[in-house]
Image (spheres, coloured by chain):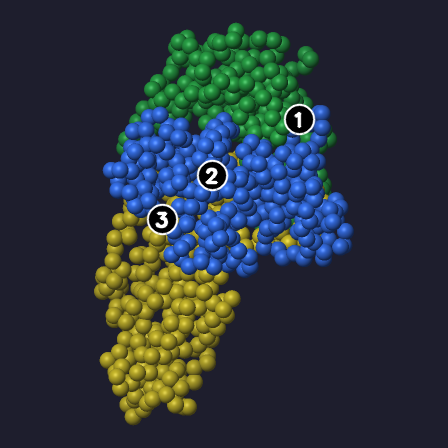
Amino acid sequence: MRSGETLCIVGESGSGKSTLALAISMSLPPNAVIERGDIIYSDISLVRSDKKLIDKIKGRDITMIFQDPFATFSPLHTIGEHLLDIAQYKLGIDRKNARELVNNVLRKVGFTDIERVLRSYPHEMSGGMLQRVAIAASLLVKPKILVADEPTTMLDATIQYQIINILKNIVDSEGLTLILVTHNLGIASMICERTMVMYAGVIVEDGETRDIIREPLHPYTRGLIDSIPRTSHYKSRVKPIPGEPLDPRIQIQGCPFFNRCPYAVDDCLKNVGYTIYHNRKIYCRLYR
Amino acid sequence: MTGFIIVINFLIIGAVAPYILTKPEDAWGISYDLNKAFLPPSLEHPFGTDAFGRDMLNRVILGARYSLIIAVGVVSLSFLIGVLVGVTAGFLGGAFGTALMRITDMFLAFPPLLLAIALAATLGRGVMTTIIALAISWWPWYARLLYVSVNSVKTAPYIEAAKVVGVGRISIIFRYILPNSLVPAITQATLDLGSAVLEAASLSFLGVGVPPPIPEWGRLISEGWVHITKAYWISFYPGLLLLITVVGFNLLGDGVKEYMNPRLRDLAVRGVRRSRGY
Amino acid sequence: MFSNPLLRVENLKVYFPIKSGFFGKIIGYVKAVDGVSFSLKKGEIHALVGESGSGKTTILKAILRLVDPIEGRIIFDEKDITKMREDELRWYRRRVQAVFQNPQTSLNPRMKVKDILAEPLKIHTDSTYKEILERIRELIRLVGLPESVLEHSPPSLSGGQAQRVAIARAISINPELILLDEPTSALDVSTQAQILNLLLDLKEKLGLSYILVTHDISVAKYMADYISVIYLGKIVEQGPAAYILNEPIHPYTRLLLSSVPELEKTIISFPKIIEREDVKEIKGCKFSLRCPLASDRCFREEPPLIEIKKEHFVSCWQLNI
């Protein structure tokens, strides 16, 4: 990814999108094993670095926003305490001087009554407000990369729209690099220049969001877009992909989309790989 | 699975114990021969002999039966009482349920040891007394477990769904609420079997539970304690078997817990995926 | 056009008491549903659209008689079922069924699928054992599942499979009306499409009517003939789907529709929303706190539902803007 790029990772359950996000922000659970490959940030290998270096980068250069805002914050501390803690422990600024910084980021995400927010406990706020606080908390450390894992999935539609807009504005004004995980292609088209579609742990299509939506190339992406209802069923029926998303516990040979793909042939079980086709990276034999 | 095998072995031994004893007089503690006292483990006496010259192997084997009877007895009795109280409180709910639970809490305050001593004093020591004493101090745990369980099941969506289908109240209680509420209690009970053996042994060790000459393991350990330096085997072998049994029950309990959970997921997912249908 | 509606809901109000203190004194009410009216024609799909806290699920529960309304009437096939007791509702249960949001929690995890499907048949029909078995097989086929799932229990099924079982259970006794509470919210996009199509096919095949509760506009757009938009317990706008979706009038409806991230952006203009934190309890329109068009009257008086054109109702004082 280039600096300042906005990327959406799109997929259904079991696609591995959340795991990828967790890996990038170095927040994988302890029982996760990185078998192969690397994540390289600014010439530093995150996979091979020692804990000290990772701790410096994690939560500072790369920050993350999670799906459930209520699980992100300790219910026993006020928002003010949370933000001041971050300023103190991550930035090394003492609490008195940090006040100005904290007020600043809260304003950036659209809060007007700052005093009240600082005094509030998480349960006194709505999901949307808390998610804005989460974004503000990330901004405090002036990160280079912001990873957001389905930040609006648990929110109402109207709030979701508001939050995505705020996120978009901030990413633009602060020049952040954004990785947004979502199952909703509509959100991807709102905020990301680039989209990666994942299925069963594999990136099946990677390219410009606009292009992918206008002309999806990979059979899975096509199926996904055809599944989204856009008009009344009287006018046209959606064409769902037969079968169900692959259970990540099942080992497969070759292309994971094989048993649901209308273009599958025996060869798909052996010869799969990436090709570049019209500025897009695709994992499918159709484009070789 | 391992737990199951261990437990089954002990159950069998316990069941047939009286019939496989080579020296029943020793086991039951009827006879003694001081000449043979404190013999270390040998071919003739694989577990040695105790202070009265009684063969330890035989005593330990018979002890298995007692330990198991007590364990199963305690857990069953406390489970039964606990289920009755917990489920009633859960169903009736409201003030009555809360009141019932407060009464349950009072029983929790009974220190098992004191209770056992008191009962032993009034009813005399014995297997039955031990079982009753332990059950009285144990049942509140099950009652609480069931109360919480019933309450959470009562509000589960599938209960509402059942009402929409038109399922009658009785059916809902017996096919929906009970089977689902009992699951955590049953898993707990299986895990508790090991603890029950241990607690019974503790009581006997302290001289309160089972009286001599009954060779309950706790008792055996207690009897051998004073001789631990010169005749370790008197306490050691009963202790070892106690350990194995408790571990066995715990493994069994874990296995039951796993079984009761949606582990069967894999089977359905794998099987149905074959078809490229809808 | 003149056939009697299958279901009529009249001025439905469902309040939940807020209790406090040791003796549970009632200090107020949560007005989950505060005066909702609509009717459903046979063969119609009516979508109740709203966000969390709108009361849409409570409306369904009231129609299913899982909660008791404090006011209002529910009339099914010209019979007032509002006050009927459970034993009087048996016939009603045979004709009105439901599918809930989370299939894993709406099916008894300790029952096998075949028992789950047999249960309604045993209760409402006097079919023989053989007839029930045959019917179960037929149902499984109808919802697109292989017979092997019959021996499984819900925890070992995937979300999509479990929801199909729930649908099979709902149609097992040939009901006329099925209430669906966010039937696809817990499912993946591709599975959602399958289930929605299944519901449409079943509706055609079996002559069903649906009341569909959803927070997802695209689902409403796809499925609904008629839409009621609900905000904090009240219907703010209702009418044929085409009207609501293409020419929304109420500010909340417009806000909702403009918030949908569309693949091809169709702009429905809406001025920036406001969050007024000062005003606490309003006697007037519930949406006035967030409405940029709100005037004094909006805070004081509740606007009535007015029919602004044929079958299109809106509740708002600012209609001329």
Front residue of this view, candidates C114 and A38: A38
Front residue of this view, candidates B50 and C12: C12
Chain A tint as drawn: blue
Horizontal and vertical percent for residue C21? 28, 31
Which residue is depicted at the point 23% across and 61% down? B114
Identify the mark nearer the N-term, 2 or 1: 2
* Quarter of the figure with residue B249: bottom left
Q: Residues within 10 Å of mark 3 (few under 14, many from 20)?
A: many
Q: Are marks 2 and 1 in contact (CB under 8 Å)?
A: no
* Disc ID at residue A176: 2
* Disc ID at residue B144: 3
Q: Are marks 2 and 3 in contact (CB under 8 Å)?
A: no
Horizontal and vertical percent for residue C126? 66, 37
* Disc ID at residue A231: 1
Chain C tint as drawn: green
Horizontal and vertical percent for residue B202? 29, 68
- Say whether residue B106 is left or right of residue B175: left
Front residue of this view, candidates C180 and A117: A117
